[in-house]
Image (cartoon, rainbow, N blue to C red):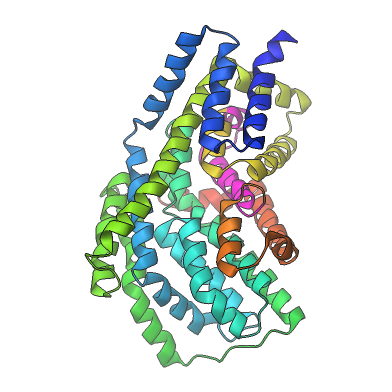
Amino acid sequence: MWEFLPVIVLVLSFICLLAIGTPVAWSIAISSLLTMLVSIPAMPALTTVSQRMGVGLDSFALLAIPFFVLSGELMNKGGIAHRLIAFAKTIVGALPGGLALINVIAAMLMGAIAGSAMASASAMGSILGPEMEKEGYSKEFGAAVNITSATTGLIIPPSNVLIVYSLASGGVSIAALFMAGYIPGILTGLFLMIVASLWAKKKKYKLGERSSLKQVIKTFIDAVPSLFLLVVVIGGIVTGIFTATEASAIAVLYTLVLGMIYKEITIKGLPKILLDSSATTAIVMLLIGASMSMSWAMSFENIPQDLSTMLLGISDNKIVILLIINLLLLFVGIFMDMTPAVLIFTPIFLPIVTKLGLDPTHFGIIMVLNLCVGLCTPPVGSVLFVGVGIAGTTIEKVIKPLLPLFLAMIFALFLVTYFPQLSLWLPGLFDLL
């Protein structure tokens, strides 16, 4: 019984703190401290937790996060979303559920440039939401499509969460993770588009007008400067010209200049953009620091090793173990934000899957794609709340159109889990594994 006391203290204290409304970061830090108090005196426990929080943030790779957050804010305010939506409209606007498909494609493109689900949900919801309503689409369906498609930006690079996974895994190549995210991210987007199109057909939503070749070329030319950022950032990382951190700084400079050329960003508006991105960065960094202290506390108490032994005791079949891990992560994603979940559960599950011969890069994509589902579910789903808030509806009303889109995401997760080449083919092609 006593050997399970640290696990009991960790789980119960964390759940109780969340239940009484304690912010997630503080819940993680306090439950880590209480877990350590089981084994060591108060003063060493306090100093160790605070030290681990500081050391956890002392990483050059993490510098990429504030820069990518800032570039996302600049894109949101810099007119880039409008141009991406206009381009997407000329491609799929005339298909069944055209505006929903535009939302998915534009979110994928926005995610591929900004790497932020929140920025994508905010931009697409505020621009496309009213237009979809005007065309006869239900507010709830529009919100559901926006919420789920926004998460594709966390798989399609650049992605802050993949950088966090690289840190938590002990140094899996960020370039390999970025390249590994393309096919699973695009696959998820395609499944969402199929479901959205079938739903729109069933509800008999109005078809849009077919665009001429001239319109397609014009909107593409307008979108090229925004899309070129992909070539600069990902191309530079893959070819080794610069690191992911340096690429993030280049992304900020590029989007700032582009926003000013478009005359959507002014010197007067910059302080607010900087303040908003600083607030987002502070939240993310506090979560990372607190999660690193919990990871250390769990390692100190041998919790990952015990869980590994327990899981491998159930079965040594890779298919069964991956199914159990996916189910556990889907459950975790409902109650925990993505960043702390990656930092806490990577050290637990990664040794298990590597023992079974799974590539760490492949597992990173499985984990992030899995936790994307949690961003769309109550009670903690941040993207769900943003999407519902912008649409001006309620969670209860959005759940019905969300369910088939959830199934599309889970089907994509199943394929990515059991067909490793979907994740590993591109990194292997560029000799990054």
Q: Quadrant of the N terminus?
A: top right
Q: In which quarter of the image is the C terminus?
A: top left
| Number of marks | 0
- Indicate left or right for 383 with 171 as reference: right
308 or 66, which is in the foreground? 66
> At 59% across and 45% down in the image, what residue appears?
366
- Indicate left or right for 156 with 314 as reference: left
**Is 96 drawn above or below residue 283 in the view shown?**
below
Q: What stretch is highlighted in magenta?
A: 348-377
274 or 337, which is in the foreground? 274
Percent coordinates x, y for residue 334 in the rendering: 67, 45
The answer to whether residue 254 is magenta is no
Kindly report the secondary structure that dominates the magenta region of the rendered protein.
helix
Q: Residue furthest front?
A: 20
The answer to whether residue 365 is magenta is yes
Q: Residue furthest top?
A: 41
> At 59% across and 84% down in the image, what residue appears?
134
**Is 314 drawn above or below residue 142 in the view shown?**
above
140 or 201, which is in the foreground? 140
Percent coordinates x, y for residue 274 in the rendering: 30, 54
| Residue 122 visible, this angle | yes
**Is 124 drawn above or below residue 232 in the view shown?**
below
> At 66% across and 88% down in the image, what residue appears?
206
| Residue 68 visible, this angle | no
Percent coordinates x, y for residue 162 in the rendering: 47, 45
Figure quadrant of residue 252: bottom left
